[in-house]
Image: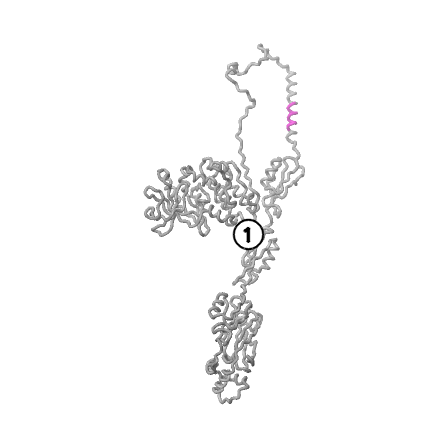
Amino acid sequence: MMEKGYAVGGRYRIIREIGEGGMSIVYLAHDLILDRDVAVKVLKYDLQNNPETTRRFEREAMAISELSHPNIVSIYDVGNDHGMQYLVMEYVDGTNLKEYLRNNFPLPLERIQQIMEQILSAVAQAHSLGIIHRDLKPLNILIDQEGNTKISDFGIAMALNDEGMTQTNSVMGTVHYLSPEQARGAQATKQSDIYSLGIILFELLTGSVPFVGETPVSVAIKHSRNDLPSVRQKDPSIPQSFENIITRATAKDPNDRYESVEAMLEDVGTALDADRINEPKLVINHEDVEATRLISSHPTDELNDKDLLKMPEGGILPNEDQPKDVKKRKKLSPHQKIMAISGGIIVGVVLLLLCLLLINHKKEITMPDVTNLSEKQAVELLKSKKLKISPKVEKLSDSKISAGNVIRTEPPVNSKVKEGTIVRLFVSTGAPTYKLADFTSQSYTEAKDVLERHGIKVKVKREYSDTIREGIVMDQSIRPNRRITKGTTVTLTVSKGQKEITMIDLTGYSRKSITDFANDHNLTKVEDPAQYSGDYEKGTVMAQSPAAGSKLKKGDIFHVTFSLGARPQDNSESKSEKSSDIPSNSSSESSSKVTNSSNNNSNNGSNSSSNTNSNTSANNDVSFSENIIIPYQDNSSDDTTAANSNPAQNDVKIYLQDSHHKISDLYMEIKIKKDTQVTLPFTIGKGQKGLYHVVSDGKMIINQSVTAPENN
C-alpha cells in the first residue's frame, strides 16, 4: 500500500486509496505537472514479481492508451516506480454502475437505453481496433456527476486474463457476466463481450443478475446450461424489444448472437419505438445435428479367433445341414427359362404400379390455425404438417394482430387440404401508424382535434409562461416525426399565460418594501403625491391602487401614496409649506379665480391674484383622491389610429389641475390592454373645483371637473 503524499514516478502525489480489485489497487492522486487529479492503478505485489505479467501489462496498456472515446476512461501514462508497475488514468468523480443501480433502481427505460447506447458505442470503438475487454461488468463502468458512463479497465483484463482468473476475487466479480465459452476455457472473442453486455442490460432492467450460486463454478455451469430467465416474467411492463435484445445477445452459441456490437447498438437505439414495444418474442432454435453414422446393410456378429480358425478358404462358413457331397444343380430348359423371365417381368410391373400409387397418394389433413403466430413459427408448423409455403407473403396492417404475426391463411383454417398444398400467408404490419407533427406554437384546440381524428388520445398539462400566450402548445411528450399507432397517448403542455399576481395590502409598508415588492413581481410602481395622515407614519404607504385582492400580471402598474405624517399644527409653518408647493401659473391662477366664488378680495394683477389665491388655498386646502375607470378602446380596425404602433393596447395620457398641477402639464402616461382603474390625487380649496383630462391614442375621452368635499 502506498503512503499518502508519496509521489509516484516523482509526479503523481498520492491523496488516498479509492478502490481495490483482484489484481490491483487504485489511488486518487494529483498530477504535480498538469495540476489535475488523476487515478493511479498499481499492480499488486504478487503480480509485480512476474516478469511476463509486467511486460504484457506495459505493452497492452500502451496499446489501449490510443483509445479515445468520451465513454472510455482515458489513459494518460504508464510507468515503473522502483519495480512497481503503475498506470495513470482519468479520474472520474462519481460512482460505478453497480452502486448507481442500487441507489436509483428502478431506472426509467429511456435512461437504461441511454446508458446502454453509451456503453455499446465505447465497446464498438474498441472492437474496431481489435481490442476485446473480456471483463465487462457494472463494477468496471463508472458514472460521473453528469450521468455519463465511462468504461474502465480496458486492456488490463487482456493483459492479465490468465493470471487474473486464478484470483478468487476476480472470478467472483466476473463470473456473473462470463460467457459460456469463456467458462469452458475457450478463447474470448467479440461475441464474449456481447454476452456480457446482454447480462448488463438484464441487470439494468431487473436490478439483479440472472444466475446466482454458492460458488463461482456453480454460476458458470448455469450460464453454460440454463436458459436465461425472462425479464418480462419479472416485470411485465418491460417491452418485448428489450427481452429480445437480451435473448439475442446471450445466446449459448456465439454464432447466434449479434454479429457485432454495432448491430446490438442499432437494435437498442430503436427498442422504445412504438412499433417495437410489443414485437413478437424472439425464439432461437439451435439444434445439434447428429453426426452421420455408417450402417452396414447386413449386420454381422463379431467374429472371435476360433471363428477365424474355422473359416475355410474363400471366407464362407459351412452350413451344418448341407450334405458334404454337394450335387451339381440341374440346368433349366428353354421353356422354363421363358416362363421365369415372363413371371419376373409381371412381378416388376406390379411392383412399379404399387410404388406409383403410393407416391401419388397424399394424406388429407385439416388446415392448422396459425393466426397470431409469428411468420417464422407459422412456417415451421405448416412444414411439420407437410404443407408448402408460398414465397409471396401478403403484408397487411391490422390493429389487433401484432406486427410480424399471421393474420390469416389461404386456404383458411380448419379447411381440408392434402399434404403438399401450397399455403399463402397474410402477415400483419401492425396497427396503422400516424406520423406525429410538431404541434408546438399551435392552438391546443386545433392540435387536439387533429390528434383525435387520427385516433390518438390526448392529455393536457397546463403551465404558466411569460412568453407564450394562453392556449398555445409549448411542448409535446412524443417528439415530432415519430410514427405512432392508434390509441397512443400524447401529452400536450399548454400555456396558461402569465401567472396572475394577487395584490396585497400595502398600507404601512416602507418605500424600500414597496420597491422590493415591485421588483419581485415584475410590477411597475407609481408614487402619487404624498399626503398628510394622522393614521400612518411618515414614509409609509397610506393609500394604494388597485386595492388589495385585485389581480395583476407582470408588467402591470400600481399606485401608492406615501404619508407625510400628521399635519403640522403651526399655521405659519403650514402656510410656508403650502405656498412653496403651489405653482404660480397664469392658467392655474385663472382657474382658481373662476372656481373660488367665495373669495372677496380685489385683485389688480396676475401676481397679486396669484398670491391672494395661494394664501387662500393654504388656509383651506383639502387633499382627496378620485378613482376613475379608463375604458379600453379597441382601435384595431379604425383608420384614424394608423399612427398607433401597437393597436392591441391604448396609449393613455392624463392631465390634471389642482393646487399642485397645471392642466397643460402631463401628469401620467400608461399603456392599457383592458379597462383600468386609476387613482388621481387632488389638493384644492374647500368648495373649489379641480379638473382632469384623459387622452387615449390621441383622442380625449374624459374631460371632467371635481369639487373638493365640504367636510374632510
Q: Quadrant of the C terminus?
A: bottom right
Residue 659 lies, with reference to residue 324, above or below; the image says below
* Direction from residue 226 to residue 169 in the image, left or right: left
Q: Quadrant of the N terminus?
A: top left
Determine the image quadrant of residue 166: top left
Horizontal and vertical percent position of residue 63: 39, 43
CA neighbours of label 1 inside 10 A, class few (<14), some (14 to 19), many (20+): few
Residue 462 lies, with reference to residue 619, above or below; the image says above
Give 541 or 355, whichever is nearer the viewer. 541
Determine the image quadrant of residue 333: top right
Q: Which portion, as a residue range, is magenta?
A: 347-355
Horizontal and vertical percent position of residue 503: 53, 67
Residue furthest to the top in view is 325
Amino acid type at mark 1: Arg
| Residue 679 seen in this snapshot | yes
Which residue sits at x=38%, y=50%?
37
Determine the image quadrant of residue 446: bottom right
The chief SS type of the magenta part is helix
Is residue 690 part of the magenta span, yes or no?
A: no
> What colouring method underlies this structural image?
one colour
Horizontal and vertical percent position of residue 358: 65, 29
Q: Which residue is mark 1?
A: 482
Residue 692 lies, with reference to residue 21, above or below; the image says below
* Direction from residue 358 to residue 442 in the image, left or right: left
Horizontal and vertical percent position of residue 679: 54, 74
| Residue 191 seen in this snapshot | no
Is residue 351 part of the magenta span, yes or no?
A: yes
